[in-house]
Image (cartoon, rainbow, N blue to C red):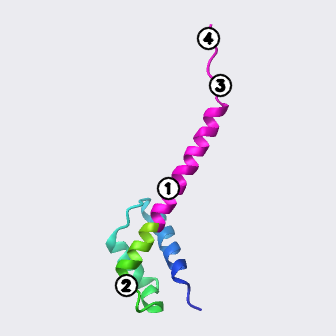
Amino acid sequence: MTSKLTEYVAMAATEYLQETGKIELDARWIAEFFQDSGVQDAYPRQDMIAFYAMVQKELTKRSDRAGKQAHMHLDKIIHFIKPPRKP
């Protein structure tokens, strides 16, 4: 069974983040992934540049989500920290 294109996009984003820790997608990396992961075979009409854009969009979405979660956690921490008492 062939994976959905969205599954390849998610897999590429996950692998890229794990390998590099970066959110700006490297063109060489995605070109290798496109060929080696089977995207090219499963979707022979898929344009690699369009695939790059989809993976970059997923990376950006994940980064934004992580930033929002970090901000929320910091807000919770700040809420529980009490300011020192003034003498």
Disc 2 residue type? Answer: Asp
Q: Give the answer, above or below, for where 39 lies relative to 67.
A: below
Q: Quadrant of residue 78?
A: top right
Residue name at image x 45 percent, y 61 percent: 60
Quadrant for the N terminus, please: bottom right
From the viewer's perspective, is the residue at label 1 or at label 3 nearer?
1
Residue segment shown in magenta? 58-87
Which numbered tag is attached to residue 82?
3
Disc 4 residue type? Answer: Lys
Residue name at image x 51 percent, y 61 percent: 62
N-term mark: 1 or 3: 1
Q: Position of residue 12 (x, y in %)?
A: 47, 73
Helix, strand or loop: magenta stretch: helix
Side of 6 relative to 29 (left or right): right
Disc 1 residue type? Answer: Asp
Tag 4 residue = 86
Considering the numbered disc 4 on the image, is that residue within a helix, a strand or a loop? loop
Q: Nearer the viewer, residue 32 or 78?
A: 78
Q: Are marks 1 and 4 in contact (CB under 8 Å)?
A: no
Tag 2 residue = 47
Q: Are marks 3 and 2 in contact (CB under 8 Å)?
A: no
For marks 3 and 2, give the CA distance. Answer: 55 Å
Q: Position of residue 48 (x, y in %)?
A: 36, 81
Q: Position of residue 46 (x, y in %)?
A: 41, 87
